[in-house]
């Protein structure tokens, strides 16, 4: 699947998006929607509305935010809602400041465990090669 071109908002587009009551904040490349909008959008989606229809009714211009944004946002919000409930929709899990990231210590521990597992596999491969070489030497002696 090809990578989609990232949308970069102009100053004017950012001002218009920030004026929308369903928007919490906007950067050049990202829109943070209000938790209330996320919840309402999920309810509307469950009642059969199309993602693009939900966003257009909420005052978003699909030419500005991108035609894939509604579908992808709702997919992400549904997954978040299933895992964390309503509270999950109020917490931004994207970006450096997100609270959804694992602490650095946990990441280091996971990396260490993966490295140790890889070492065990490599050691087992070395042992196997040594046994094969020993068997080949025995075979040559006979």
Image: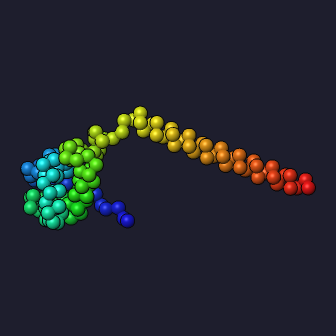
Quadrant in the picture for the N terminus: bottom left
Residue furthest right as drawn: 142
Image coords of residue 46 (percent x, y): 17, 61
Q: Is residue 103 left or right of residue 94?
A: right
Say how the picture is coloured: rainbow
Residue at image location 41% in from the left, 36% down from the top: 106
Judge by depth and name the residue closer to the eye, 2 or 133.
133
Quadrant in the picture for the C terminus: bottom right
Is residue 49 at all visible to an observer of this figure?
yes
Q: Is residue 86 left or right of residue 2?
A: left
How many labels sit on residues?
Answer: 0
Is residue 52 at all visible to an observer of this figure?
no
Judge by depth and name the residue closer to the eye, 50 or 29.
50
Image coords of residue 98 (percent x, y): 28, 41
Residue at image location 23% in from the left, 50% down from the top: 81
| 107 lies above or below 78 | above
Residue at image location 36% in from the left, 39% down from the top: 102
Residue furthest top as drawn: 105
Image coords of residue 128 (percent x, y): 71, 49
| 15 lies above or below 97 | below
Residue at image location 22% in from the left, 47% down from the top: 85
Q: Is residue 112 left or right of residue 120?
A: left
Image coords of residue 137 (percent x, y): 85, 52
């Amino acid at each position: 699947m090809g990578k989609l071109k990232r949308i970069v908002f102009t100053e004017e587009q950012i001002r218009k998006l920030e004026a929308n009551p369903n928007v919490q904040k906007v950067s050049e490349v990202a829109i943070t929607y209000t938790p209330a909008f996320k919840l309402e959008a999920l309810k509307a989606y469950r009642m059969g509305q199309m993602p693009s229809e939900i966003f257009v009714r909420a005052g978003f211009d699909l030419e500005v935010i991108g035609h894939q944004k509604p579908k992808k946002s709702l997919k992400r919000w549904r997954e978040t809602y299933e895992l964390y409930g309503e509270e999950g929709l109020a917490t931004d899990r994207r970006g450096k400041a997100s609270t959804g990231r694992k602490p650095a210590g946990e990441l280091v521990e996971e990396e260490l465990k993966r490295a140790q597992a890889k070492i065990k596999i490599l050691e087992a491969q070395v042992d196997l090669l040594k046994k094969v070489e020993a068997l080949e030497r025995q075979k040559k002696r006979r």
